[in-house]
Image: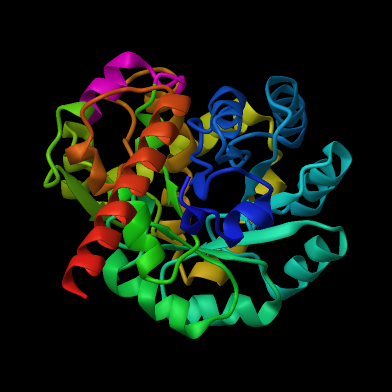
Amino acid sequence: MNPTLRTQACDLFGVRYPIVQTGMGYVATPELTAATSNAGGLGILASGPLTVAETDTAIARTKELTPNPFGVNMRGDAPDLPERAKLLVKHGVRIASFALAPNERVIKDLKDSGLIVVPSIGARRHAEKVAAWGVDAVIAQGSEGGGHTGKVPTSILLPQVTDAVDIPVIGAGGFNDGRGLVAALAFGAVGIAMGTRFLLTSDSLVPANVKHEYLIRTVNDTVVTSVLDGVPQRVLRTELAEKLIAAGAVSRAARSVRSAFAFRKMSGTPWPDMIREGLTMRKNHGLNWLQVLMAANTPMMLRASMVDGRVDLGTLASGQVAGVVDDLPSCAELLARIMSEADEALGRLSIELLTSA
């Protein structure tokens, strides 16, 4: 392997390759997380939709499946975040990942517990803020990325962020091969993070019919919308997504109320905790009450698609990269391919530089 591909990310996380599998709800299971880590990357277990007890079980299961480092993704605004953080310490998991960064006090507490804190950001100012709070690295996700995403394309965001902070930056949004890894390194990043590409592997437990929906799409078959939970996220243009976007506020509110009751029943979360979480979301993300109510959709709609295979009932978070993915390799095959392609790209660049010198 070209020495250039042994980056700060490898040393920080204790992994062989500078490739991160993101903590996608109901997708980043113990099986996918372990498969990624066993293949030499950093797998990140999704705990957002799980209860504390379920998270405990999922971490233990992941440890059974891999001896290698992995991380756990948590919600920075979760009311039970301290309990979840204790689980990481209990199990010896060193990496805490966040889709939305926690506050400064939480970051300090996590670091005092010996955890490596890695939030995702979508703007330079956010990277500067969390870097000042003491995070160890950031995942900078461009607008091409799936799920909750920002407005700045990866090719612009990455150099902005790497110029602005002196901590390791991992690029996300639009990556799926070795050429992308080399491009990210050229922008100053120390690695890449991928979600959709890992969802579309044979190690992913997402139902086959759902994977098929991704494989048949083009790069133009996604849309960014705030109607699902009040925060912009990129999803596939399914019939359901189009209906929700076109629906009126009353219709979406009614669906959200039903989802809130269903999620409370499924998770056993007490109403006071759900209300407290809603208040936190309202404060942290500037949501109005209707948007807070709409956020109740997310866990149930994710579960419907990613677990139950009901494309008609659930949304499909997706990066634009789904439009260029056409196979379902194992995680081991995928990472080996990416590293081989990156080696080849670097070799080609070296030859071209020598030729032009």
Q: Does the magenta stretch include residue 314?
A: no
Q: Can you give x and y, in whole percent of width and height, for residue 81 in the image?
A: 74, 52
**Residue nearest the viewer, comparing 87 with 309:** 87
Instruction: Please tell me which residue is depicted at 63% across the width and 44% down the height of the picture.
Output: 15
Instruction: Please tell me which residue is depicted at 39% across the width and 60% down the height of the picture.
Output: 231
Where residue 79 sits, quadrant-wise, is bottom right
Instruction: Please tell me which residue is depicted at 43% across the width and 33% down the height of the picture.
Output: 336
The part of the chain drawn in magenta is 202-214
Q: Measured along the vertical axis of the image, is residue 131 above or below residue 208?
A: below
Q: Is residue 210 magenta?
A: yes
Q: Measured along the vertical axis of the image, is residue 14 above or below residue 101?
A: above
Q: Can you give x and y, in whole percent of width and height, for residue 88 in the image?
A: 79, 44
Q: Measured along the vertical axis of the image, is residue 16 above or below residue 163?
A: above
**Residue nearest the viewer, comparing 30 with 147:** 30
Quadrant for the C terminus, please.
Answer: bottom left
Please state if 210 lies on the left or on the right of 6 as rendered: left
**Residue nearest the viewer, comparing 177 with 152:** 177
Q: Can you give x and y, in whole percent of width and height, for residue 311 in the image?
A: 28, 24
